[in-house]
């Protein structure tokens, strides 16, 4: 039995939370009364599967579900699925911007390696693959006579069609945390076991559920369960569920649907509700109802007319869609999941990739899907647009997809589900028939452009619309010495994509070479630009800049880029146009870029942690945790590193404090200071000035150094206070001095 533990958890029909065996009447439906309730609420145990045998509910269930005011599942399924969709789309976006992730995602991993990755590294990609393996096995074993959705979601659809309030009694993060916490408990034997063994086990579980036997549900799974497992899966969650139930029942009459294994046991929901003062009693039925016949009596919910943000199309969906913008302005999607049928609806539009044909786009989609097989392909026209339609099957899922091309815009609409018959349902036909392409002005115009400014970044630029922040690209800075601010905008009418990126070095770092940075930039751009049309190092308002333009591979897209190094900040502009070279829109975008004065900073006296020194600085000094980047020239474990960072100018004001050895000796002051100060001079750097300085009573030397191949200037000041050496360092194109430092 042990080998199927996490599969059981996956279904929600899992162990009870106490080894003590109670005598439970055979009922999954329970009435809740007493305490301060004036009307009863109801509790029902579910099983998170699609096997049709589970859906022949008693007539009492439908009767009371129709009478109550609200329906609540463990989770608000709409919120949960929205979260799942956003996570999945985020992964797609990560892969789109990162070739390494694409390659890693295509590598086949054995079950042994997946389990090892989860147990040792908490690898989320391996967890997702484990879930896919489980799901495929379940669908393969229970493929006959399946409903289109699971029990909880079917009842959700019934409640919605009766106009009930719907919600959840857990938070999405609660269940995601459970999966994370149980990661180390995964047993590879459960995944490698035979389908025959798993089918036998599932059939037994279904039989127990259909028989409404809570005693067997409680008893069947008690062996070999750790206290940790019970606490994670049940005790914590059951307590929270009961608190939420208590609150909701005092607002409206409720029908609660939770996994059947949450009901029995001393820590089960029934017992916990009784402990709160409620009377919880079983409800029995006189007959069972065919789910198809009952569903046929319900009214259809009204569909919602949806229009995309750029007003390029309209379409109708069976519910309010989520806006998916993890791809930034490159491709914005509207996604809705009809929980009652587990049908996915998705639509979007994007600037066309030049000469890419609809066949190429469809082929790229099917190739991305695992074992994607294309069928029922046809070409047609709609609203003056060329279109292509096909069905794609992949890994037990089915997709009906249409692409349209009109002017500069590609349109995509898709419906998907686990049941192939859903793709020919009345709802899916309605969805595709409702799609309409809007008339938009395709005449390019240089009027009505707007200034886009980030005052704290020191620039302004003109754009034909309001750009949006691209958090996906900003995350690419994670694990580097940079932070990114990225904004992009797609002008659908002219077929031009614009992006503005600002890269700031984090505290304690500075740009070491302009040419080296530009070489690295070109290497990165070569992944996109295959035919270089322009490669030029120039200056923008006196700052070194790289202009690098060219064509994308297999597409008539011209990419134009500009990188401007302003001290420790880099501005990157990118435009992608399907209109050929010398696009006036692109030219205006680049010509309008203007570097502006930095926002004033609050310079004032600031003391170091421990009050060991003070200086006038733009922010409080923070002591840096020692790492490999510290103390490259002077390996003294007692050397302390403090930084005051100015985010407006991206300048780090650093102070290094070092206690000299007891018997340290130097020939004279000049040689002593020269040893420390010139250690910050590179082999090909130039010393612009060098002289003696004083900070109050402290004496020292100062160097101003021009770094090789760099617009930045480095200033180093070395001060001696008894046996303690202070080194002040800053590097930027703006020389704000650290000359005000004082030691108490």
Image: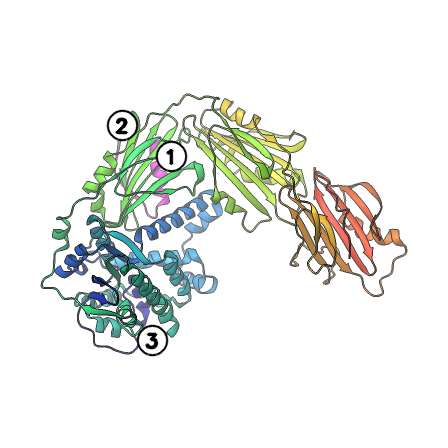
Check if residue 368 falls in the magenta segment. yes
Membership of 427 in magenta stretch: no
Q: Label 1: few (<14), some or many (≥20) within 10 Å?
A: few
Say whether marks 3 and 2 touch (CB < 8 Å): no
Where residue 118 sits: x, y (%)? Answer: 43, 62
Residue 712 is labelled as none
The spot of residue 522 in percent (x, y) is 58, 37
Q: Determine the secondary structure under disc 3.
A: loop
Would you name the residue on which mark 1 appears?
A: 309
- Looking at the image, tell me whether mark 1 or mark 2 is earlier in sequence order: 1
Chain part drawn in magenta: 357-378
Check contact, mark 3 vs mark 1: CB within 8 A.
Answer: no
Residue 100 in the image, given as x and y percentages of width and height: 48, 48
**Of the two numbered discs 1 and 2 in the rendering, the one whose residue sits closer to the viewer:** 1
Q: Which mark is drawn over residue 224?
A: 3
Q: Residue furthest right?
A: 667
């Amino acid at each position: 039995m042990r080998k199927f533990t996490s599969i059981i958890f996956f279904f929600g029909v899992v162990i009870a939370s106490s080894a003590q065996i109670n005598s439970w009447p055979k009922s999954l439906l329970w009435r809740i009364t007493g305490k301060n309730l004036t009307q009863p609420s109801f509790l029902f145990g579910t099983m998170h599967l699609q096997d049709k045998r589970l859906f022949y509910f008693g007539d009492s269930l439908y009767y009371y579900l129709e009478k109550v005011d609200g329906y609540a599942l463990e989770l608000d399924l709409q919120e949960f699925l929205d979260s799942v969709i956003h996570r999945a789309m985020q992964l797609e976006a990560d892969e789109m911007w990162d070739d390494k992730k694409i390659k890693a995602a295509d590598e086949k991993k054995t079950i042994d390696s997946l389990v090892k990755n989860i147990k040792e590294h908490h690898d989320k990609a391996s967890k997702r693959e484990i879930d896919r393996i489980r799901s495929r096995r379940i669908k393969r074993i229970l493929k006959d006579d399946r409903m289109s959705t699971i029990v909880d979601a079917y009842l959700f659809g019934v409640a919605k069609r009766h106009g009930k309030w719907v919600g959840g009694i857990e938070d999405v993060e609660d269940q995601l945390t459970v999966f994370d916490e149980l990661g180390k408990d995964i047993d590879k034997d459960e995944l490698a076991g035979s389908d025959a063994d798993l089918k036998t086990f599932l059939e037994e579980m279904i039989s127990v559920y259909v028989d409404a036997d809570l005693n067997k549900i409680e008893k069947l799974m008690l062996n070999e369960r750790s206290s940790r497992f019970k606490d994670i899966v049940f005790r914590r969650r059951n307590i929270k569920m009961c608190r939420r139930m208590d609150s909701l029942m005092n607002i409206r009459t409720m029908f609660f649907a939770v996994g059947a294994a949450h009901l029995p046991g001393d820590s089960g929901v029934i017992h916990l509700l009784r402990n709160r003062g409620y009377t919880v009693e079983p409800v029995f039925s006189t007959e069972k109802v065919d789910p198809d016949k009952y569903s046929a009596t319900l009214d259809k919910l009204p569909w919602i007319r949806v229009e995309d943000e750029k007003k390029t199309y309209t379409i109708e969906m069976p519910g309010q869609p989520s806006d998916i913008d993890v791809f930034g302005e490159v491709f914005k999607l509207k996604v809705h999941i009809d929980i009652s049928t587990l049908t996915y609806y998705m639509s979007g539009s994007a600037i066309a990739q030049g000469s890419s044909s609809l066949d190429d786009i469809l082929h790229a989609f099917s190739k991305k899907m695992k074992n994607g097989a294309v069928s029922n392909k046809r070409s047609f026209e709609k609203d003056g647009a060329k279109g292509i339609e096909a069905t794609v099957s992949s890994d037990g899922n089915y997709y009906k997809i249409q692409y349209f091309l009109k002017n500069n815009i590609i349109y995509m609409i898709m419906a998907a589900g686990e049941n192939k018959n859903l793709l020919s349902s009345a709802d899916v036909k309605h969805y595709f028939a409702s799609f309409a392409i809007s008339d938009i002005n395709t005449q390019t115009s240089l009027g009505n452009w707007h200034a886009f400014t980030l005052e704290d970044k020191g620039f302004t630029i003109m754009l034909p619309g309001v750009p949006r922040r691209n958090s996906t690209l900003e995350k690419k800075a994670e694990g580097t010495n940079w932070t990114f601010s990225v904004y992009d905008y797609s002008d659908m009418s002219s077929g031009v994509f614009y992006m503005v990126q600002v890269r700031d070095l984090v505290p304690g770092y500075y740009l070491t070479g302009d040419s080296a940075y530009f070489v690295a930039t070109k290497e990165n751009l070569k992944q996109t630009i295959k035919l270089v049309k322009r490669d030029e190092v120039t200056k923008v308002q006196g700052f070194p800049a790289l202009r690098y333009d060219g064509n994308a591979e297999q597409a008539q897209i011209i990419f134009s880029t500009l990188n401007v190094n302003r001290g420790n900040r880099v501005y990157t502009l990118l435009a992608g146009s399907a209109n050929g070279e010398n696009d006036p829109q692109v030219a205006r975008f680049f010509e309008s870029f203007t570097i502006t004065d930095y926002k004033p900073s609050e310079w004032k006296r600031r003391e170091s942690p421990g009050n060991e020194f003070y200086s006038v600085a733009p922010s409080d000094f923070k002591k840096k945790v020692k790492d490999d980047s510290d103390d490259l020239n002077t390996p003294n474990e007692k050397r302390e590193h403090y930084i005051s960072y100015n985010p407006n100018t991206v300048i780090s004001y650093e102070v290094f404090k070092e206690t000299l050895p007891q018997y340290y000796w130097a020939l004279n002051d000049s040689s002593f200071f020269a040893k420390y100060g010139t250690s910050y001079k590179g082999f090909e750097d130039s010393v612009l000035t060098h002289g003696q300085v004083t900070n109050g009573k402290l004496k020292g030397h100062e160097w101003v150094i021009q770094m090789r191949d760099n617009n930045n200037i480095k200033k180093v000041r070395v001060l001696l206070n008894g046996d303690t050496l202070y080194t002040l360092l800053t590097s930027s194109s703006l020389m704000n001095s650290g000359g005000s430092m004082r030691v108490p």
